[in-house]
Image (tube, coloured by chain):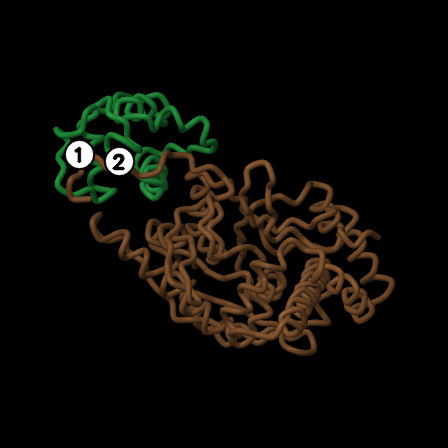
Chain colours: A brown, B green
Amino acid sequence: MSTAEFIPEMAAHDPQTGHWSGSGKLRGGRSGIWFFITALRLLGLRVTYALTVPVAIYFSFASPDVAATMDFHRRVFGPLPWWKRRWLVFKHFLSFGFALIDRTAVLAGRTKHFSFTFDGEMILREALTEGRGVLVLTAHLGNWEAAGQLLARLDVPINVTGFDNESPEVRELLNQAGPQRFRLLPLTGSPTDVIPLLAALRRGEIVAMLGDRPYGSPSVRIPFLGGLASFPVGGYVMAALAGAPLMHVFNLREPGGHYRFFRFPPQHPKLPVRSERDAYLRACAARFAGDLEEVLRRDPLQWYNFYPFWEETKPPVPPPVPPRAKTTLCPSR
Amino acid sequence: MQISTHELKSKVIESLKLQDITPEQIDDDAPLFGTGLGLDSIDALELVVLLEKDYGIVIKDIEEGRPAFRSVKTLAEFIAAKRPQ
């Protein structure tokens, strides 16, 4: 196995467009996933975890994402001596490796090694009784894929949005490994992405979106951990258009394969009049960033956005419409 | 089935909560996005939902929808052509 097969391109830099894109795709694709599934089957969970150590050491020196990761550590831990910075990068990458193994194990149906605590089940069920579905806004924190799979006991279809960059072969391997309990609704960065999401909400299902990476969706720049960062607002627009309740739900891995969920009260976003819309969406995103920070600070090394988060970058997918321009027709804006 | 551009403009103004603008002030051929009416990507989401809710038109492919979103006139023609009878 080449080590390069191990680490996913959670923040892949496209040399052609110069864009950082969150693809969530496993680098090395088929062979990487195959390795995980085979290692889990033959060697078990513990040995597979141990195999991650040399890989994490290698990447904590060789990865192009080290600088961005150190910037994040400085923001949450403050200034640190050089050895501590290296150590934290290693620990962060190791934690990510564990998350990937858990993800593969859970998606492959090996859920018996994992447990979870979700004290918001009643609240989520209650929100679902409104019959308009629930939009769950989560983050690249803990292990949202494993968490989503563990939530399957809610008996409500869960739709997860994301760029479907996983090749058909990888998807096939995952499907062979075990039944997938949630549906992936691909995002392409186009406004038409909302159609399947709306349909799912109308069927009363859960739609989960990642609120801490602005994919191609409309976004705002707001203060976060001492700097301005881009957060998507598409989720709030969607919930408002569908009349669906929206909940911030995060999860963190705890020792022993235990996942703990953190949830915040349901909101009912409503788009205000035009002139107040941007301020409103900014406030929504700021609330999300605040909730995220609260949970993230419990274990910062479980936040997996290994790219220059505070840099202003263009969305990975070109927006389908030109950016807003001043117009004489709408003087109020 | 034909749809008047005036009716469509009223709908757009209402659902996008555009302020201080009347249907008469919107030119049939003025671009909806960028220069012209100055709509943005959030409005694009809302327009897609408006077409689906009010006219039963589901745009699956943005390439199909792109020419339709050029102006009020092209949008009205698109609705007339696609609307389920």
Q: What element carries label 2?
A: loop
Is the C terminus of chain B in the top left, top right, bottom left or bottom right quadrant? top left
Residues B27 and A71: in front is: A71
Residue A53, quarter of picture: bottom right
Place of residue A128 in the rendered image (x, y in percent of width and height, measured from the top left): 43, 63
Q: Residues within 10 Å of mark 1 (few under 14, many from 20)?
A: some
Q: Residue at x 69, y 67 (%)?
A: A90
Q: Is residue A218 left or right of residue A34?
A: left
Marking on residue A329: 1
Residues B53 and A264: in front is: A264
Circles 1 and 2: CB atoms closer than 8 Å: yes
Place of residue A135 in the rendered image (x, y in percent of width and height, measured from the top left): 43, 58
Q: Both on one chain, marks 1 and 2?
A: no
Q: Is residue A255 above or below residue A326?
A: below
Place of residue A170 in the rendered image (x, y in percent of width and height, measured from the top left): 72, 46
Q: In this view, does A89 lie to the left or right of A74?
A: right
Most extreme residue toward the right is A42
Q: Residue at x 21, y 23 (%)?
A: B28
Q: Is residue A208 visible?
A: no
Q: Is residue A321 left or right of residue A254?
A: left
Q: Is residue A120 visible?
A: yes
Q: Which amino acid does label 2 sit on?
A: Gly
Marking on residue B38: 2
Q: Is mark 1 on a helix, strand or loop?
A: loop
Q: What residue type is labelled 1?
A: Leu
Residue A113, quarter of picture: bottom right
Marking on residue A152: none
